[in-house]
Image: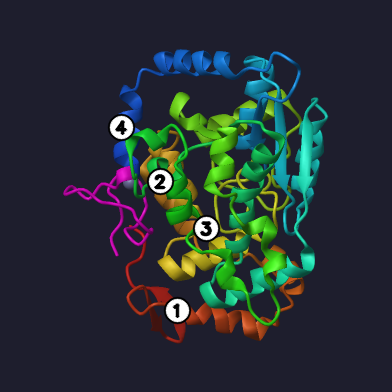
Amino acid sequence: MRYCKKCLMPDTRPRIIFNKDGVCNACEYAEQKKRIDWEARRREFEKMLDSCRSKDGYWDCIVPWSSGKDSSTIAYKLKFEFRMNPLLVTVAPQVQTEEGRHNQQAFLDLGFDHILFTLNPKVHRKLARKHFIQCGDPWLAWTQAVNSIPVKVATALKIPNVFYAEHGETEYGGKVLSKKHQKERDLAEVYQIMIGQDPKEWIDDEISLNDLAPYMYPNRGDIERVGVKAHYFGYYFRWNAYENYLYAKKNWDFMTVQEGETELDLPGVPKKGRTQGTLTNYDSIDDKLDNIYYYLQYIKFGFGRAVRDASRLIQNGVITRQTGLELAKKYDGEFPSRTFEDFLQWMELSEGEFWKVVDSFRKPEIWEKKKGEWVLRYPLQ
Ligand SMILES: [Zn+2]
């Protein structure tokens, strides 16, 4: 396990590539971003919008919307800056936080149309539990629904443009299948990377084919008939999650995490409030299951949410590697005790079962036992 020389990301992140100087491809892309002519990209964006802006009052685009700072910033800009007529589509969070509830309402109150899709709780809980035990990922079915529902709505309501945030594989280190698809989402990539499993594989004694409709991606024929195109906002505008947070704070009553405190020292970021396991208090804060997901990521790959968040801040030049390193060392792998009880209850798991699952994902290449405690074989440096 080695860490990128520029950010903190280790090579255990799936699909990340390191160059001969020990720098990851997310950092290489961060360098490229400095040389992109963003004015030209903005003009390209405006031209594209001119061809798809509604003239009859109907919705002209869909924004898959979580109520977080990123998707909200996109929806806000499309509606108020670019005069589009977006329809927001949300898959309801599994266990919504107070902050998430507040942010959802505060944003809708600005004046948006919104479809909230609620997954069958009985089925979804069974799937989340099964995937947590089998793959250490309580999010797997959820991610599938989040990918499929907005495109299903686009296809059904014949709204051909969908606006996604950033292309994760480009922005954070991964496998870029083709340059073209940094701009427009590629169906092959959705199937290969973002989904990776056919929901039909989930059928068992408890789950039937009829339970799987929300998780099934629309078929290619339907998508092509409506001509649905999924655009990446991050291709047209320099993507920076911290700037999106500042934008949210400036333009609506965006609530950050209320409990705890952080040593992250950035203009506009309150000291009060911090998500456990990381340094931030404004990112991915609407679902109580998030923290367990990131904790399992820490167990499986040896890096947690603090390394992830600090690396992104370093890549965008918001903090130095040294600052990120100090904060990540302090917070990475911190156990999400605040949301643990809710998680167990929702999952119908005992604490003993939880730890048994956790330990089943510790690889000896990443973890070793010292004086009865699990420690990383190659600590962050
Ligand atoms: Zn890096």
For this view, does 216 lie left or right of residue 57?
Answer: left
Given residues 269 and 147, the one toward you in this image is 147
Closer to the chain start, of discs 4 and 3, is: 4
**Label 4 sits on what residue type?**
Glu
Amino acid at dot 1: Trp
SS class, disc 2: helix
Q: Residue 107's image quarter? A: top right
Q: Tag 4's secondary structure? A: helix
Q: Which numbered disc, 2 or 3, marks the residue closer to the eye?
A: 2
Image position of 8 (left or right of 98): left
Q: x, y (%) of residue 16?
A: 33, 53
Which quarter of the figure is the N terminus placed in?
Answer: bottom left
Q: Is residue 71 magenta?
A: no
Q: In terms of depth relative to the viewer, which is nearer, 95 or 199? A: 199
Q: CA distance from mark 2 to mark 4?
A: 15 Å
Distance between the alpha carbons at the discs numbered 4 and 3? 27 Å
Q: Earlier in the sequence, mark 1 or mark 2?
A: 2
Q: Which residues are magenta?
A: 1-25
Q: Name the residue carrying label 1.
A: 374
| Dot placed on the residue nearer the N-terminal end, 2 or 3 | 2
* Mark 3: amino acid: Tyr
Q: Which residue is mark 4?
A: 31
Task: State how far apart marks 4 and 1 are (Cα).
Answer: 36 Å
Q: Locate residue 44, reporting x and y percent.
A: 45, 16
Q: Taken as a whole, is the magenta stretch helix, strand or loop? A: loop
Disc 3 target residue: 331
Which residue is disc 2 drawn over?
A: 169
Cα–Cα gap, marks 1 and 2:
31 Å
Q: Nearer the viewer, mark 4 or mark 1?
A: 4
